Image (cartoon, coloured by chain):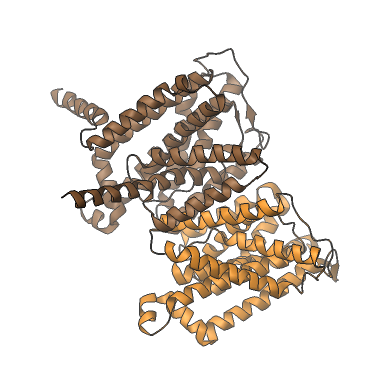
Chain colours: A orange, B brown
Amino acid sequence: MVLAAQIMASGILMGTIFGLIALGLTLIFGVMNIINFAHGEFLMIGMYSVFLISTFLSIEPLLSLPLVAVVGFLLGIISYYLLIRYLLRGPMIAQLFGTFGLMLFLRYLVMFILGPSPRVIQEGVLIGKTVSFSWFTFDLSQLVAAGSSILLFVLVSWMIERTKLGRALRATSIDAEAARYMGIDTEKMNALAWGIGGATAGIAGGLLVNFYYATPTIGMLFVMIAFATVALGGFGSVKGAFAAGLVIGLIMMVAGHYLSQIKLAFVYLAYFLVVVLRPRGLFGW
Amino acid sequence: MVGEMKAVVRILKDTFSFNDLPISERIAFAAFLVFVFFFPWIVHTAYARAVMIRFLLFAMYGLGWNLIGGYGGQVDLGQAKNVGFGAFATVLMISWWGIPFWITVPVGIIVAVAESFAIAYPMFRLRGHYFAIATLCVALVWQQLFLFWDWTGGARGVELSIRSTPNFTYMQFGAMGYHYFIFALFMAEFLFMNWFRKSKMSYELQAVRDNEDAAASLGINVTWTKVKTYLITAAMGAVGGSFYAVYHLYVDPRCVMQLDLSILIAMTAMVGGAGSVWGPIIGAAMLIPLDMYLGALLGGMGFYGIDFIIYALIIMVIAAREPRGIWGIIERARRRGHVLRG
């Protein structure tokens, strides 16, 4: 019983991070109807940024997060202006391969510069510490990651729901042409969605690297999980991404406890079943 | 009786006739065939011959994918699972029971087609991105299962014992033999495609691709048209997989069922020009030598990964600038030529 509760609790902790990763993906999809294969590479670059900063500058991993957010934001914006802008004019198949090309490019660029071996952060206030609540024991780093994810989620949701900028973003996602007539610079909104996507994925990577090793090829794993999360929550739905992240986290932890080698098969299967049975996802419209 | 004879003659004529294509394309293709036919006599290095065999294999994969992806417009990113079914059917049946290669090929096809049929109807309820990622997920589920199961060799994979060559029961030869073997398979598939593109089904499929609602209103069964095509594509992938198994004499889920293979297959068709006869061949002719020579050259100089970076740049430029691929560039240039002349 305690074991089951512990598994579910760590599933939920992991799920909040999956939700954070899916947030940017679902935002980008909602605004311009494009799937970003390179999303996992944004996360991977976030992981490496924190690793490099903490190893070579001896700056505490947690404090480097704002810097990582800036790196991710710029990465998203640059990708948009140099590549995605042109892809949006083409057919869907070109969009898929274009972002896939971006994924390969970033992955092998990092591999070329830093080598293929896995990297782990050695020093930091969170590393290797655990916290106990009555029967439960958690990694402090996971707990902080979950807390930060929720915080960031609230922040982004607030920005989208309440601010003028968020309203313009939503208008663009509902009907880009009408938004243009209203004087909204939709090109900038698209870039903003990519910036937010890059920043949130980067921060997720920065949180993840405290308890997960970084390799140049790690992105694929997380982007596949994020696809499943986004589909489950409904393409384009921000709240859905969060709820679906929790569900996916639970599936992975429970399946991982019993059948650890094929836990990902359950995630992919979940995606397949969801899109076939309820194509709009849990919260899609 | 006479009617059936006429139908057979018609099919044969459609299969072997290229009369509807411009003379320049026919000459270029004939030159290509002559080149490939005499290639092992002109070029003697083992590496170049291996590149040629890989090129023909990927041209074949691309031709198969072009059916569903090019003519059908359905972005299938799971073709690796069919390659895997074919490869595993061959490798397991030969290593367990010593069954001749030629019997394992139809078994691989049946497995791939049956699995594709089982998932086709739910799959084709989806469109666009949803469909693409669903195909990707299904292929990854199979890869995970094949890695997990013991009877498929798990992560260790399955090896085939080397036999005295040449051996037509288990299809093991030297490089020369494999060259003509894959060339024959490639030609068979190409001639099938030549028949297909003139068939009624091809026109129905393109109508479905261009406008599903309009196609349905003309009495075309939209879903069944897609499903049929999906099954043919699956069968073609399985044949390629069977060849892969006897060529490499080793199969494991990481090499034949991986995501990168699915994407590379789709990419050969897309880079060359999806939905055109020559697209997959042009795409494979560009990507495969680039991949193999660049990788060997730069890897030898200690620059691991640069080949993929260049590769990725090419993909991005083509996707952004000319989504219709290299064939799109050729056609545009040709049209410009017509305008200037006339």
Side of A204 where A99 appears, left or right: left
**Vertical position of residue B309 compared to residue A194: above or below:** above
Q: Is residue A116 above or below residue B20?
A: below
Work out whether A159 lies above or below B245. Answer: below
- Residue B44, percent across and down? 52, 21
Residue nearest the observer in this picture, A226 or A41: A41
What x and y, as percent, mark residue A57?
Answer: 80, 67
Give above or below for A155 relative to A282. Answer: below
Q: Nearer the viewer, residue B64 or A41?
A: A41
Residue A2: percent from left, percent from top? 80, 63
Residue B137 visible in the current orientation: no
Q: Quadrant of the N terminus of chain B?
A: top left
Residue visible at 24% across and 38% down? Answer: B198
Visible in this render: residue B284?
A: yes
| Residue depicted at 64% across the width and 65% down the height | A18
* Residue A40: % across, % down: 61, 60
On screen, residue B322 versus residue A223, left or right, reads left
Q: Residue furthest front?
A: B340
Q: Is residue B70 left or right of residue B138?
A: left
The quarter holding residue A213 reads bottom right
